[in-house]
Image (tube, rainbow, N blue to C red):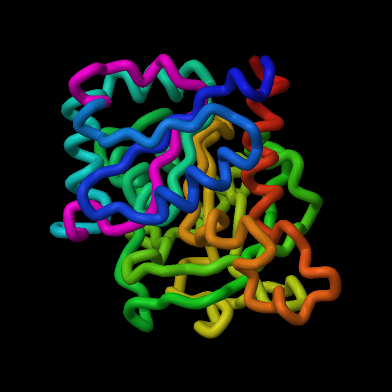
Amino acid sequence: MKREEIKVLLMRAPGTNCDAETVRAFEDTGVDVSLIHTQKIFREKNLLDYDVVVFPGGFSYGDYVRSGSIWAKEMEYRIGTELEKFVNEGRPVIGICNGFQLLVEAGFLPGFEGRSIYPEAALANSIRGYQCRWIRMKYVNGGRCRMMSKLPEDYLMRVPIAHGEGRFVYPQEDEKFLERLQDNDQLVFKYAREDGSPANMELWYNPNGAWHDIAGICNPEGNVLGLMPHPERAYFGYLMPQWSRDEGHPEYGDGKVFFESIISYVEKKI
């Protein structure tokens, strides 16, 4: 499939943000990007007209009840069948920050046995409250999440976080849950130190106290990805905090390869 033929749908809802940055990142890769309000998709039910669906960050519906829960339930009621078919056909779905919260609330992640009726995990209140700062996350996937296959092994990405409810937890903090994520190769990103070593739950490096430093996971099939950090805010070089000190002022930042990898995967798949 030619790159310019790839259709990316970015959905927005009351309270979401970062959609403009995400659109700009995808547009720079050369694909056709549409930013459309959730309600229009609900009415037209044309989700399957697109090749990639992205749920952006923000605070949909004011994060009432729980972050992403209202948007998730509305999505389930209005286009749940279409979204489930989209996922079952192997098309990529990406949730960033609030989008990750939505995918967990809607039962698509971790999705051990396919989409679950009830959330299998949670993105709870951060230990230190709302955090908005630069962190590092490390790519730890072994290849299951094929849309991230262009990321170099152990790729260390400097990206911002901006959330109050992003602490990935499993209700019983059962080690068997972690083993299952590892055995299925569903761990995709972990919070890390500057040298790439584990954050080990230290709050300066793991900004929200996420269980086992988990920053992003995928479903067992590898086509649904959720992560709390914001790669779209690290796409261009001038967005990086050290850009003015870098020799040559690089055009792109650490987040470029994230988006390029998604599109490269769709090019080869279709």
Give the quadrant of the N terminus.
Answer: top right
115 sits left or right of 77 in the view:
right
Measured as percent of width and height from the top left, residue 24 is found at 53, 46
Residue at the right extreme of this rendering? 247
Task: In this rendered view, identify the residue nearer to me: 186 or 194.
Answer: 194
Splitting the image into 4 quarters, where does residue 66 fall?
A: bottom left
Task: In this rendered view, identify the residue nearer to me: 33 or 132.
Answer: 33
Q: Residue at x 57, y 51 (%)?
A: 179
Q: How many marks?
A: 0
Q: Is residue 169 above or below residue 11?
A: below
Q: Is residue 43 above or below residue 28?
A: above
Q: Residue at x 42, y 20 (%)?
A: 86
Measured as percent of width and height from the top left, residue 103 is found at 36, 42
Report the span colored magenta: 41-63
Measured as percent of width and height from the top left, residue 152 is found at 80, 50
Measured as percent of width and height from the top left, residue 196 is found at 74, 71
